[in-house]
Image (cartoon, rainbow, N blue to C red):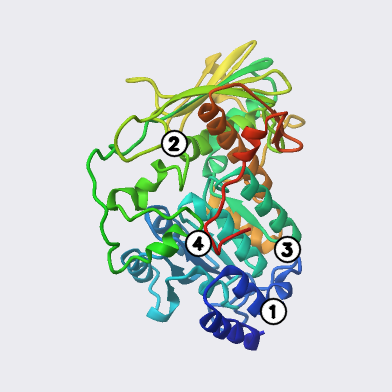
Amino acid sequence: MMNRAKSARTALTKKGLTRRNFLKAAGGLAAAFTIPEFVPSIVSGQSAPSNQITLGIIGTGRQGLLNIKNFLHKPGAKVLAVCDVDYQHREQARKMARLAEDSSYNDFRELLSRQDIDAVVVSTPDHWHALISIAAVEAGKDVYCEKPLAFNVAEGRALCNAVKRYGRVLQTGSHQRSDKDFRLACELVRNSRIGKLHTVQVEIPENSQPNPTTWKVTRPPSGLDYDLWLGPAPFRPYIEQGCHYNWHFLYDYAEGQLTNWGAHMLDIAQWGNCADFTGPVEVRGTAEFPTEGLFETPLQYDIEYTYSNGVRLLCRTSRPNGPETHVRFEGSDGWIFVSRDRFLSSPASLAQSQTSPGEVRLYRSIDHHQNFLDCVRLRTRPAVDAETGHRSATVCHIGDIAVRLGRKLRWDPKKELFINDDAANKMLSRPMRAPWRL
């Protein structure tokens, strides 16, 4: 096994760093990891009990650093490597994890070739989520991937298929499912404590960064591998204000707050509506797009989804001076409002109630990162597995398509296609810049 990994790295140097070169050079490396049991990579030494999980962190910006902090404090978990195309981010992460310089990588494929890493954490911009995660499971790694699970519907389905094919554990970073208030809200709704559910209202925030009105094209800084940062995205000249966190608001890399905050709140709407493995059947909406400035994703959303059970899901941008980002479930006999800070209900007594034996009880997780580690050890389904994360991300993606086309669309959640609408179906995937492809 070690010889295979060494030859894979040698081939990467000679052939050029493409994902398919890596997989071809690695030969049987991925196949050797596809057994369902968890066998940790490090099996000797004081810090290597049979349940220790070794991690590589790919993407070390704001969210990547938060993930490192979380995993560094977990018993039985050890961060062995970090990877980022930005040297400054990479160095900050390396020092935080107390790693040697040779455990810091610019290219994720070199990290994936390490045989001693059991799982990776993908905290990159959205347009990289699926490609890196697919390469990881093919290389025999389990994956913690930030939300949204994928950049579009086609990539999400490809990732789900890969996770299933290679028998890996994948946790989507939709961590609200590991919050007791969100779980309680969904349990009460699923047990008809507010009567028959008919409407779910979701509010997401406006863009969190000011839209640059002036900018200039410059050379990328010397420590940034800009070509690899772009990866499968179309080439565009480097603009400082469009990189790092601001990529959320450029359509080549993300879909704005709909796939940022919407991926969290729409996920809870799906959970409460018992729609984890399906989705809406109709979607329509409007959006206010910027007319000037650098950013391209909408400033305001007003989207309506309809499910086969008759439930309407309304996703809107928060009103000025209105309540914080939240989900509100409305039924025939009451309602529940839940956010990261508040739990309100009518009748008010619901806030103090609990489910009873024999009622629906949803997946229990109190720590999203620990849940991932536990499921890697036990080879069990995590709180937000690939299929669940994909279905929630799909709600975001088809909403974005509807507002861009400006008309009502009918959706088949089983086939994952729009009904009789070729123009909309073409938007379920994005072309990738060579040499990148699924």
Q: Are marks 2 and 3 in contact (CB under 8 Å)?
A: no
Q: Identify the residue at image location x=31%, y=39%.
A: 209
The Cα–Cα distance between marks 2 and 3, rounded to whole angstroms, is: 32 Å
Q: Nearer the viewer, mark 3 or mark 4?
A: 3
The mark that comes first in sequence, 1 or 4, is 1
The Cα–Cα distance between marks 1 and 4, rounded to whole angstroms, is: 33 Å
Q: Are marks 1 and 4 in contact (CB under 8 Å)?
A: no
Q: Is residue 235 visible?
A: yes
Residue 257 image label = 2
User: Is 279 situated left or right of 347 in this image?
Assistant: right
Tally the marks: 4
Residue 351 image label = none
Residue 27 image label = 1
Q: Position of residue 235 (x, y in %)?
A: 43, 55
Which residue lies under the disc numbered 3?
Answer: 166
Q: Identify the residue at image location x=59%, y=33%.
A: 398
